[in-house]
Amino acid sequence: NAGVTQTPKFRVLKTGQSMTLLCAQDMNHEYMYWYRQDPGMGLRLIHYSVGEGTTAKGEVPDGYNVSRLKKQNFLLGLESAAPSQTSVYFCASSYPSNEKLFFGSGTQLSVL
Amino acid sequence: KQEVTQIPAALSVPEGENLVLNCSFTDSAIYNLQWFRQDPGKGLTSLLLIQSSQREQTSGRLNASLDKSSGRSTLYIAASQPGDSATYLCAGRGGGGKLIFGQGTELSVKP
């Protein structure tokens, strides 16, 4: 039972490049989330999904897109990376929204 | 808008001491509150989840309480050990279902 798996673990991009972060969970969770964690800012919700085929905006959605084509996968895309998107990105999943969250180990992204 | 605050930002204690970490939130219409542990370079691990109808939850040496009327939650760690050193975050789930995190308390337990 792997839990929540994020790939890649590290990535360096140049400004304007695009990339996709993949999150996979094997716990049959309905809810999935993407957070970013920045020093002094805490964890902030980017986008989330309450089920296959659904997505919704969080606190800081600008510059990101997401897709949930399969229940077990939640993809986070950066179409044109900016230095302000340098951060550690975490994916999480849960059963219905009032249950505890399970987190992946994070992706450290640097945009130069 | 829900805001979650954790004070202090950092705490250092000697091994064996009992300690309390504090979390305050502004919106009393909270569905649940979770405490997480984060080790350096790692993801978050959920420690305890308190539903709005509950007053406290216990797991081993950890006890978390929730007082909605005062907008406060505490995490009590008994007989602290060096392995407890980590950053502890609380997160409240309010209206709309969004989970709002505090900025964490970095705990260091000295041998």
Image: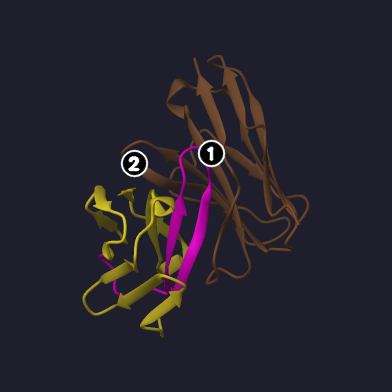
**Marked residue chain, label 2:** A
Side (left or right) of A94 relative to B105 = right
Residue A9, how many percent across, how many down?
Answer: 62, 32
Q: Secondary structure at mark 2?
A: loop
**Marked residue chain, label 1:** A
Q: Secondary structure at mark 1?
A: strand
* Chain assigned yellow: B
The first of marks 2 and 1 along the sequence is 2
Residue A57, how many percent across, how many down?
Answer: 52, 50
Q: CA distance from mark 2 to mark 1?
A: 13 Å
- Asked whether residue B12 appears in the rendered view, the answer is yes
Q: Nearer the viewer, residue B28 or A63?
A: B28
Residues at discs 2 and 1 both on one chain? yes
Mark carried by residue A41: 2
Query: Range of the magenta residues?
Result: B23-51
Residue A106, how many percent across, how many down?
Answer: 57, 40
- Which residue is denoted by mark 1 in the rendering? A89
Identify whether A87 is placed above or below B74.
Answer: above
Going 44% across and 40% down the picture, which residue do you hit?
A: A37
Going 45% across and 58% down the picture, which residue do you hit?
A: B36
